[in-house]
Image: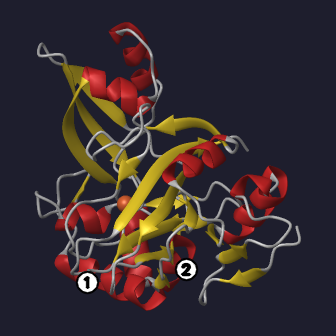
């Protein structure tokens, strides 16, 4: 690869720049790009002028499957490319769909228009977060798993799971998933209880990573994250996680045409607030081939 490669802030992440011989994102070789991605976990491709259509076709070369996000406005005919969260507020750190048994391997972002000021996507390395948390907190999350309960229409579950299947097929898939209890309702929906660890093994390297949705669950409508025994994650633990993630936070200072690829098994991401309505960032979720 002749492209210039630089570190992304103080993180393991890398910036890969376009060059005279490689101005189109599709010039990049999949094998070499994956080699860098596996060790760095975050790649920012800069200077390639990537559109959301190109993000999808580039991601296809690395991916076995796309995962739909039904909660966000979709912009392509396949409904796999979305606008990111509406609004201009900051978000809290989370791994994408970490509350779901169909958590994607990678989240891709591309920027059509950056915010005039602020609005950076931020990220932190879950391996480093796990190292920095206190021993008491580590023991708490080792001894207790998290629990989420939600109801999802069957049609949407099919799309989230990438299944083109009957109810019987869906039941078979759910039966095979660790930590999932479910009930098929009469109104064509399925109630799901999912019990999962806040500490996950990274897809590459098999490291322990604190990469989950604890802060988002705490910050969400329910205003609480719960353990499997229905006890609430204490506020002082939430405070400690926020402090550690803030200290490890890195920023992606968006430029138009940037593409970003984040290892969702290792990193959490969020965004900074902004105050103009220009910002246009798209995302897509996928599982990787290798
Ligand atoms: Fe997200």
Is 65 placed left or right of 23 in the picture? left
Q: What element carries label 1?
A: helix
Tell me the distance, in whole angstroms, between the alpha carbons under discs 1 and 2: 17 Å
Disc 2 crowd rating (10 Å Cα; few below 14, some 14-19, many 20+) is: some
Would you identify the image quadrant in which residue 194 lies? top left
Would residue 143 be seen by someone viewing this image from the given angle?
no
Is 129 placed left or right of 70 in the picture? right
Identify the residue at image location x=29%, y=71%.
278
On the image, the x and y values in percent for residue 223 come to: 12, 64
Identify the residue at image location x=34%, y=79%.
241
On the image, the x and y values in percent for residue 101 come to: 41, 40
Identify the residue at image location x=86%, y=66%.
21
Quadrant, the N terminus = bottom right
Q: Is 231 located above or below residue 256 in the figure? A: above
Would you identify the image quadrant in which residue 127 lies? bottom right
Is 207 placed left or right of 271 in the picture? right
User: Which residue matches tag 1?
Assistant: 239
Considering depth in this image, is 98 or 24 the residue closer to the camera? Answer: 24
Q: Is 102 located above or below residue 123 in the figure? A: above
Would residue 289 be seen by someone viewing this image from the given angle?
yes
Q: In the image, which disc is placed on residue 227?
A: none
Identify the residue at image location x=43%, y=91%.
247
Disc 1 crowd rating (10 Å Cα; few below 14, some 14-19, many 20+) is: few
On the image, the x and y values in percent for residue 280 come to: 36, 64
Q: What element carries label 2?
A: helix
Is tag 1's residue or tag 2's residue first in the polypeptide sequence?
2
Q: Which residue lies furthest to the front in this view?
A: 20
Would you identify the image quadrant in which residue 143 lies? bottom left
Q: How many circles with numbers are drawn on the protein?
A: 2
User: Which residue matches tag 2?
Assistant: 128
């Amino acid at each position: 690869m002749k492209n210039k490669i630089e570190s992304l802030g103080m993180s393991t992440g890398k910036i890969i720049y376009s060059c005279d011989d490689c101005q189109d994102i599709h010039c990049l070789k999949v094998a070499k790009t994956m080699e860098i991605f596996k060790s760095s976990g975050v790649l920012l491709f800069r200077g390639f002028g990537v559109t959301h259509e190109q993000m999808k076709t580039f991601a296809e070369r690395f991916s076995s499957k796309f995962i739909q996000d039904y909660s966000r406005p979709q912009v392509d005919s396949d409904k796999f490319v979305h606008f990111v969260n509406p609004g201009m507020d900051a978000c809290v750190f989370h791994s994408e769909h970490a509350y779901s048994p169909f958590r994607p391997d990678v989240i891709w972002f591309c920027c059509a228009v950056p915010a005039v000021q602020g609005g950076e996507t931020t990220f932190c390395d879950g391996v480093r977060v796990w190292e920095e948390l206190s021993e008491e907190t580590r023991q708490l999350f080792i001894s207790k798993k998290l629990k989420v309960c939600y109801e999802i229409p069957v049609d949407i579950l099919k799309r989230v799971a990438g299944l083109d299947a009957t109810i019987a097929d869906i039941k078979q898939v759910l039966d095979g998933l660790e930590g999932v209890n479910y009930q098929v309702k009469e109104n064509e929906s399925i109630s799901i209880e999912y019990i999962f660890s806040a500490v996950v093994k990274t897809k590459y390297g098999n490291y322990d990573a604190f990469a989950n949705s604890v802060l988002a669950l705490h910050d969400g409508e329910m205003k609480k994250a719960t353990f499997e025994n229905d006890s609430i994650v204490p506020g002082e633990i939430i405070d400690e996680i926020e402090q550690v993630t803030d200290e490890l936070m890195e920023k992606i200072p968006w430029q138009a045409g940037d593409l970003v690829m984040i290892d969702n098994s290792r990193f959490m991401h969020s965004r900074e607030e902004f105050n103009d309505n220009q910002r246009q960032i798209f995302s897509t979720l996928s599982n990787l081939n290798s």
